[in-house]
Amino acid sequence: MSLSEREKERYRRQLGVRSWDQERLKAASVFIAGVGGLGGTSALYLALAGVGRIRIADRDRVDPSNLNRQVLYGEDSSGCLKVDEAGRRLSEANPHIIIETSSEPIGRESLDRLAAGVSLILDGLDNMEARFALNEYSVRHRVPYLYGAVCGWQGMVGLFHPPVTACLACLLSSEQEAKPEVPVFGCLPGTVGLLQATEALKYLMGLEPSLLGKLLIYDGRDMTFDLVDMAKNPACPVCSGAV
């Protein structure tokens, strides 16, 4: 997919990066589930980088408690649907790409519409039930699933792509109880969201992702990173039959 002269000028500083493929990014599509701290940060940098089609879904409205960490919103956004505000701001950030929005709840039935035809799924959720629905869709349709999560000072990022790798259900049980609202260090979703965006861009350009089948755990308090291999569970109820 060719670039216009305006796009070439816009992306000039990144076109010289080794192995960068702007045309491939322009042809790519991403579904971002949730546009809060994680998904909003990822969406902004994927838009700025020139990913051709970004589809975002979130049913929530902006709450004042979001504003310590969610970069797409301001005081004037309070009470607005997140996807409306995010869609507008992403389109302003880069008018050369397509932004699609939905406030439909993310679940097993809706994902057949929301994630249809995308190159990559990016998780910006704080809801485990919706996360497991994303994971099942990823396994069923063999679409890579870029996981991210934050709590307190700690965040994590990993890339699932069964049957090559484990899936989320290999690591976490869908039977676990949903946690109440968790505290989070305001900078943390930005850090983790940028790590997700970095891995997403590498994958979309055909470069080998660093976190394929691995979980990167970041501690903002101690400023440490740990990289853990994600082992497949041969008895996993979701991906054990994937071949």
Image (spheres, grey):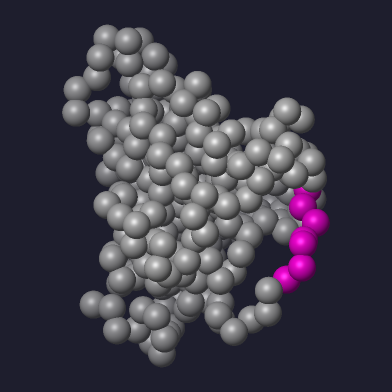
Tell me, yes or no, if residue 51 can be seen here.
no
Whether the magenta-drawn stretch holds residue 241 is answered as no
Quadrant placement of the N terminus: top left
The one nearer the camera, 122 or 104, is 104
181 relative position to 157: left or right: right
Whether the magenta-drawn stretch holds residue 185 is answered as yes
The residue shown at (56%, 71%) is: 129
Boundaries of the magenta span = 179-186
Quadrant placement of the C terminus: bottom left
234 relative position to 191: left or right: left
229 relative position to 30: left or right: right
Tell me, yes or no, if residue 154 can be seen here.
yes
Image coordinates of residue 95 in percent, x first then y, are: 41, 21
The one nearer the camera, 227 or 77, is 77
Image coordinates of residue 36 in percent, x first then y, are: 63, 46
Image coordinates of residue 70 in percent, x first then y, are: 68, 39
The residue shown at (50%, 21%) is: 92
212 relative position to 83: left or right: left
Extreme-left residue of the structure: 1
Image coordinates of residue 144 in percent, x first then y, are: 36, 58
130 relative to 43, above or below: below
The one nearer the camera, 181 or 48, is 181
The one nearer the camera, 208 or 8, is 8
The residue shown at (77%, 52%) is: 184
Picture quadrant of residue 41: top right
Magenta part, dominant SS: loop
230 relative to 86, above or below: below
26 relative to 177, above or below: above
